[in-house]
Image (spheres, rainbow, N blue to C red):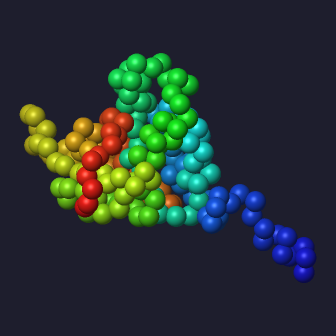
Amino acid sequence: LMSTLHGCYDSDNVGDNFYTFTGETVGSYIEKDSNFTEFSKAIKIAELSKLLKTYNKYTCFLPTNQAMKDFYSEKGVAGLSELNDSVVKYLVYSHFITKQSISSNTFSSGALSETNMNSRYLVVSFKAQAGQNVVGIYINTNSQILEKDIEVENGIIHTIDKVLTPSTAAIP
């Protein structure tokens, strides 16, 4: 009996979340794609690597490497190593909603129904693209969704072209 119970022990838990599947997760998707190495480093600093590989429902607004480099330039730093860990944690938390997987077909103008990990609402807006017959989806006014609705085992990923800036929206 003891050997059977010992076999059920899972040492890869994060809080109340347990690793229970082998498909692609938000965490593994970000780690494996070379377009997101800068944000992947930030996730490690924020200590979310294991959490993003657990069973839950996540929505990730994932900035590209170029978006991260533009952010560094705006802040006057060369990279993550020049930022305080608490700043990096706040930055990473701004890009995740942990209670729900939100697909783009449910977006409407205004604040999303769930807050990000910093307890701030993200605001969706739509803008016509100059010279094109399409409408772009923006988060917090400036971050355009480049690729939407990338489904993984534990959530949905939307890639964005700019690091999210905090919203001042108080209610959805």
Say which quadrant the C terminus sits in.
bottom left
Query: Splitting the image into 4 quarters, where does residue 4 fall?
Result: bottom right
In the rendered image, residue 111, in percent from the top left (x then y), is placed at 25, 56
Q: Relative to 69, is 85 on the left or the right? A: right
- Residue 67 in the figure: left or right of residue 6: left
The residue at the point 62 percent across, 51 percent down is 50
The foreground one among 147 and 11 is 11
- Toward which corner of the image does residue 155 lie, by quadrant? bottom left
Q: Residue at x 41, y 46 (%)?
A: 94
Specify the farthest residue to the right. 2
> Which quadrant of the figure contains the N terminus?
bottom right
19 to the left or right of 113? right
Up-down: is 128 above or below 118?
Answer: above
The reply to whether residue 124 is visible in this rendering is: yes
Residue 19 seen in render = no
Count of numbered tags:
0
The answer to which of 155 and 94 lies nearer the viewer is 94
**Location of residue 156 in the rendering, given as x and y in whole percent from the top left corner:** 41, 56
Query: Which residue lies at the image location 32% right of the left edge and 54% below the top edge?
Result: 121
Q: Quadrant of residue 134?
A: top left
Between 156 and 70, the one lying in front of the other is: 70
From what the image shows, is residue 153 above or below residue 139? Answer: below
Q: Position of residue 107 (x, y in %)?
A: 24, 58
Whether residue 165 is situated above or below residue 106 in the rendered picture: above
- Image coordinates of residue 68 in percent, x first then y, are 42, 30
Q: Please, is residue 160 above or below residue 71 in the view?
A: below
The residue lying furthest to the bottom in this view is: 1
Q: Residue at x 63, y 66 (%)?
A: 16
